[in-house]
Structures are given as C-alpha cells and as structure tokens.
Image (cartoon, rainbow, N blue to C red):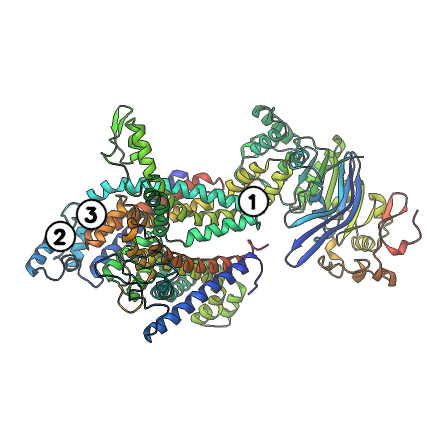
Amino acid sequence: MSLEVSHLSVSYFTQKGELRAVRDASFSLAKRETLGLVGESGCGKTTLGFALARLVPRPGKVVRGSVKLDGKEILTLGDKELRKIRGREIAMVFQDPTTSLNPVKRVKDHFVEAIRAHQPETSKEEAVAKCRQILSDLGVPEDRMKDYPHQLSGGLKQRVMIGLALALDPKVLVADEPTTSLDVIIEAQILDLIGRLKAKTDLSMLLVTHNLGVVAEVADRIAIMYAGEIMELADARTIFRSPLFPYTQLLLKLVPNIEAESASLESIPGSPPDLTKPRVGCQFVPRCPFAFARCRVEAPVLTEVEPGHLVACHLYAGKEK
Amino acid sequence: MGLKAYVATRAILTVPMLVILTTIVFLIVRVLPGDPVLLHFGKQVNPQAVEQVRHILGMDKPIHLQYLDYMAGLLRGNLGIAFSNYQPVSEQIFSAFPATLELTLYSIIVAVLVGVLLGARASSKYASVGDTSIRAFGIVSYAIPVFFLGLILQYLFAIYPNELGHSLLPATGRISAGDAPQGGEFFGVHLQTGLYTVDALLGGSLSQFLDAARHLVLPSLTLGIALSGVFIRITRSNMVDVLGQDFVTAARGRGLKERTVLYSYGLRNALLPILTVLGLQFAALLGGAILTETTFAWGGLGTYLYRSIEGYDYTAIQGAVIFFGLLVALVSLVIDVLYAYLDPRIKY
Amino acid sequence: MRKEGAGGKMVVLGSGMIIVLVTMMVLTTFLAYSGIYYPYNPNLAAVNCAAGKLCAVPPSPKNIMGTNQLGEDIFTHMLYGGSTMIQVAILSVLICLAVGVPLGLFAGYVSGLWDRAASLAMDSLYAFPGLVLAIAIASVLGTGVVNLAISIAVVYIPSYFRVVRSQVLSLKEYPFVEAVKVAGARTPHVLFRQILPNVIPSIAVIGSINVADAVLTEAGLTYLGLGVPLAGVLPDWGWDIYYGKTLFLSGAWWAWFFPGMMIVLLAAGFTLIGEGLGEVWNPKLRR
C-alpha cells in the first residue's frame, strides 16, 4: 500500500463563510496504480489533489483526516520533513503549464534547483545531465534546455513540468488536469506519454480531471467526486460498464463514446451546489432523477456494495457486504 | 529590434521630452506674472540699475531671441549667470551636485532595503498582525513630511543627547571641522569624486570616512524612511500577486525552501514593477532631498535651490530646476534600459 | 461600497480621521471670525511674555502642549492651524480633476496626433521632480491659496491624465460603448455618460492619495518659506514648524512636534482612504 487517505476534509475560510471543498474523502492508491479522480469544476477535486502535498492555498485548511504515505502521516509533518516529501515522494503537475514555470528562470535551472534542493551533494553538471536525460526521454529537444518558459509552446511546457515532477523519482504523482489547457493533438501526445510512464516505472498516479475520455485511457480505478465528496469508487471497467451512482450513470449516458475527447462533465442539467451551504442529506438530490424521501434527510455513506465497488447512495441500501 | 537599437530609440525619445521640459521652465520664469529682476532687487532700486542688469542678463531682448539664447546656452551646458553673485550657474550646480548625489545614493539604499524587505515580509504573512503593522508603518512613512521626520530624528539622536552631554550623531553638515576629503590615487589617476565617503577611502583615511558616514546616518535615514512607504506598498501588493500564482505553488510542490520560494520566485518576479517605481520615485527622491538638505544644512543642490529662492535668484532657480529635470530624464532612461535587460520576456 | 476586509476598515478609519479634522477646521474658522476663541486666542500670548524674550514654555496643565516663542498656546494652534493646508490641498485636487480628467478622457478617446502631443507633454511634466516644479511655479507666481494650489496641481495633473487615458483606451473597445456609438450618440455623451462612470473608481483612489500628496507638498513649500503668508486670524501648522525650527537648539520640541503630528494625521487620513479604496476595488488584493 502506497498512499492512504482517510476522512480528509478541507475547507476554505472565506469572508462569505466556510466553504467545505472536500468532505470526508477516503481512498487508497497502491504502488503502480493510477487512480482517476473525476468531477465537474468546483467539486473539490483539485483541492483534494493539492491537500495530499499540503499545498492547499490560503485561506484553505485541512480540517480533519489523515494522509499516510507508506504509513507516514503527512498532515502533521514539520516544515522541514514536509519539504523532503514534496517533490521527492509526492510530485505535482499542474493544470496550466503556461503559468507553472518561473518566468525568469531557464528550463534547466528549474531542474538544477529542484534536484539540488533534495540532493545537495549533486553537482550542477550532474543535475544538468540528469535534466538532459529526462527531457530527451520526454521528447523535448536538448537545445530547449536553455530557453526561458515563454519561449516554449504549451505542450513543451507541460512536458517540462512532467519532467520536473519526475526529476526526483517520486513515489506518487498528482497530475491536476494535465491536459486541459492543451489542444487535442498535444493532449493525445501527453496522455500517451503518461501511459508510457506508467508502464515503465513504479509510479503511483492520481489523475485529476473533468474529462472521462482522459481517465478511460490511463486510469486503473476511478473515483467520482460530487460537491466535495467521493460518491463512487471502482475499477475503471466497472465504472464504465456498470456504474451505480445516478450521477455517474448520467455522465456515461451523455457520452456517446467514452473515447471521445470532449466527454465532459459540464453537460449535466442543473448546476453544481453552493459549497458554502451544504444541504441536508445527499448533495446530488436537486439533479438526481431517482431521489426519494430518505435522500433529502440523510447523507449516504460510501459503502462497498460489490467487491471493490464503493458507492454513496441510498438506492443501494441493504446491499452492503 | 536588438537591445542596442532599443536603447538608441529610447534615448532619442528623451530629446523632445527635454525640449518640452526646458521650454516649460523658460516660460514659467518669463511669462508668468511677476518680474524676476524687480523681485530680486526689490522695489527701491533705481530703474537704470535694473535696466543694466537686464542688459547684462540679456533679458531686454525680445522673448523669442531670449529663448534662442537660452536654448543655445543649454546645448553648451551654459545655464546662465546667477543674479546674486554673477557666477555661472552651471559651475555652482556642479560643485553642489556631489553632496546631493551622495545623500540620494545612501537614501535609495535605505529606502529599497527597508521597503523591499518589509514589503516582502508583509506579503509572506498576508493579513497577519505582522502584515498589518508593516502596512501601518508604510502609511505613516508615506504621510510624514520628510522635513518633519528629519527634525524628529535630528532632535532625538543629535540635539537631545547633546543636551545630556553625549554626542551621539552630528546634527548638521557633511563632515566635522577641517577640510573635505581630497580623494586619492586610483589606478594611477588622482580621483576626487566629491562624495566624501568615497574620497575618504580613496585618500586612505578611515577616520575621515567614519566621520563622513556618521554625518550621513541621519539625513539618509530620514530620506530613506520617508521614501520606503512607497516601496513597502508596491513590494507587498506585487508579492501578494506573484505568490498567488501557479509557479509559486509548483515550486513549493517541488519541496524548495520557503526562502527560495519567497525570494527567487516571489521577489525576483515582483522586482520589475519595483524597479519601475524606483525610476518614478527618483523625482520624489530629489524633492525629498531638497527638504532633507535644508533640515540638515547639507550643502548640496537642495540647499542651493533654497538659498536661490530666498534671494529671488531666478537664473539659479531656473538652472537648478533644469538640472533636476535632466537628472530625472537620464535616470528614467537608464531604468528603462535596465528593465529591458532584466526581463527576458521583453522583446525590443 | 463593500466594507469588507482590511480595505473597508482603512477607508472607515481614514474617513473618520478626516471628518474629525475637517469639522475642527470649519468650527474653529467660524469661531475665529466671530471673535470667540477656545481655549486661548491663537494670536495672543497665553503666558506672560515680556517683549523681546523667548517665551516657549514646556507642556504644563495650563498649556497642555506648551507655548511657542511668542507665548502662544500650541494646543490652540493645533485646533486652528489646519484650514489653509486643507483649502490648498482640496483646491489643487479640484484643479487636477477639472484639467487632468477631461484631458485624459479626450486624449484616450480620440487617439492620433492630439493624443500623442498631450501624452508627450504630460510625460515630460510627470518626469519632473514635483516639489522642484512646484517651487519654480510658486516662486514666480507668488504665494496665496490659489497660486499655491495651482503650483501643486500642475505637478499632479499628469497622474490623473495617465490613469484616465489608459482606462479610456481599453474601455472604448467594450461592446457597451460600441453599442451607444452605433446608436448615434454624440461624443460628449459617450465620454461623460458612458465612459466616465467607469473611470470614477480609479479617479477616487488617486484623488484621495493625491490630497495627501498635496498636503505634504504644501507643507514642504511652507517649510521652504513659500507657504501662504500668515495674514488673517488663523495660525498654520506649516508655519509653526517653520518658526519652531528656530527654537530647535533651545530644546523647545513641543513647538514644532505637535503641529507636525497634525500634518501627519491629515496626510495619513487621506492615504488610508486612498489605499483602502484601492484595495476594495482591486479584486487582486481582496481575498
């Protein structure tokens, strides 16, 4: 077992009140496994990804829960230990590569800096050599190492970001919408790259996305998130073949072909709920075609209804194993 | 366009600005109501003497000829003859300038150090008690008249200790009794900069250097602190902006030290707007220098301007004002070039 | 206006300070011209003061902030001495608004040669050391509330021009402006009814910080002896410092310290309002 998240809750304390972005999320991520975390924008999936490396920006705060990496609790680490984990054990790739690199640093300097932050004994030349090797593996021409970020295209920047994330051979990679800001062709290339990475290394990956097409290609298991909560969790095949949660079902019905790149979650009727005022009962009630009395008063709990298939929905009450 | 072409274009663009500027100053003195010569000599002087002075100064000619004379003089670095002692204004200005330069240089260091460090610190503790107190300091330092701050510091650290029988810091002047430092050999050339701290070092006299430095403490703190408010504000707001960007979170996510994140990612990217402000503040700095010099009897351009105002010496005022304008235009040119050099994103 | 966060609090605090100071100024001016003084007549010695002697008395229960070299009560001066400064500052900002804003609107809207000429002139003025320019103008124009206000206004007009012009440049591309133009509205209507209201927040921000700048410039000019001459019945903080300076070596710090603090309060009040407004209206800093 590599990463174990249990009962994690994250809130943003804004002037409008507490915005409960992630509520009671639990899941695990095994070695070499890729978990797709899917939900519409504003559902808290990015916050959840950030929370794993304690990168939730102010005024956000982890309210309760635990994140354990190989048994070690991350949420209570001191600053120094936390820095050792970040980049080295848990690495991140962000949604928008155009804003994720320091505009005044050359590509290779990002690598040198990151490598030497964790391995101060590495010489600058060794770090540059490592950078060259990583980038060539990722298909970035060698002469681009000396470029500044603004000289690179979006796709190249995202390759650099992925390279930076892999520079220290992390155990877990959290990729937050790594292809959203790229055009379709580049997206396919990057996804292909991620797929090959998966095959080659021991890397565990959390792939955060709103695009079912993306997870279909690379994820082993999929977690569906709605309004800050994980509502369904199963292996990818099960999610696509026999989804249980009505939201997941709706999503799949709306997608004629799961391979379609544009299979996006924003097309479900109704609007996502206001996370500052969570309702009593199930959050999906206003958009759910099957909602009944119990759903309005009692929040369902994520329960295993079939081996390896968890869902939080009263429709499956009594089927718990 | 290459960097050289950019610098050239920028320099050429400075020319019309300077022409407008000098013309404005010329018009202010000639066209606005009030006769400079009469004001200078008072009303009792006999008309013949006034006419004579006008003639010597060339002020009896038609205004367009005066303008041509004036512009031709400017091109040759001639700022005219002072009313008060019939000396060339340009010579007087050049002898007063090093004192002002020395004061402003040290003040900029104080202002940037205090402003940028406090501003960066405030942004890293956004909305905390520390942030609030730094902002309060910034607002007070912006709102305090520079001469008033000068009086307070002068009283607290020079006059009052003196009353108690301790001499802590000198209240006025650039150097204690004795001559100004004479400079010294520098790579085989005798060099005298007029900056007393530099000249003392060139001359190899540590005691003179310390003396000059002690005299600099209060004036440069005064001017520096009064100016730091602007830097605190601009550093803080730019840093808050930059620190909220993805690449900062990404840097944290790579496990970089908070110091690296704050300075190499945050401050480094907030630096360009700060540099722009430094350029714009140079004008304010000179204004503050006039008031600071007056307070600390610092024999620079500010004192020169102050005396010229007291003596209604219009050519001197005109000369000093033009010199200040020239200085600002030059500095803003340098800043723009630096800006282009520092920001890899700028395409010339 | 939203009164949230630090920005809102700053505006409230600054406005409070200014309201108190301005009320004080109006009240004392009124009292002075009706011949009623409180607690002392600012122009008459509050302590026994023989002619030709220095009468600066340190703070005491009778004169809580001491007296100046003429034996006049400093606390009374503090109550009475702000009116010239505020008048000059407000008047100069009004001049700036009257000249800088229309010019900026016009230049930004018409573009072309007029815009370039105006911009060049304004940039030249902007690059000029403000106090030096004000000194030059004030020393030629002579002193007086209006002249001083003009000298200060000339220095700051370019700031208004630049801000308004750059906003107009982007605003005039907006669909709502285009729509009005297509509907056949005349230029003045578009400028003053459609564009101006959108520029007002930025004008308010620089306007309030500018009052502080004007107060400080006025104080600086007075410190150099170029202030509005003391003529009427009212004392002035700036001149109090100017004269208090002569008492410097005798140790009578109260004669210049308290009037100076009043100037700081006045300038800080306007700075707070400006910075606060800037923060309330600038979503980048409001989180």
* Left or right of A190, for residue B201: left
Contact, CB < 8 Å: mark 1 with mark 3? Answer: no
Cα–Cα gap, marks 3 and 2: 11 Å
Chain for mark 1?
B
The one nearer the camera, C36 or A93, is C36
Q: Which residue is mark 3?
A: B79
Q: Amino acid at mark 1?
A: Ser
Cα–Cα gap, marks 2 and 1: 59 Å
Q: Position of residue C26 (x, y in %)?
A: 39, 71
Q: Position of residue A299 (x, y in %)?
A: 83, 56
The kind of secondary structure element at disc 1 is: helix
Q: Which residue is mark 1?
A: B124
Chain for mark 3?
B
Tag shown at residue B57: 2
Q: Nearer the viewer, mark 2 or mark 1?
A: 1
Whether residue B116 is visible, yes or no, is yes
- Mark 1 surroundings: few (<14), some (14-19) or many (≥20) residues within 10 A: some
Q: Quarter of the image holding residue B107? A: top left
Cα–Cα gap, marks 1 and 3: 50 Å
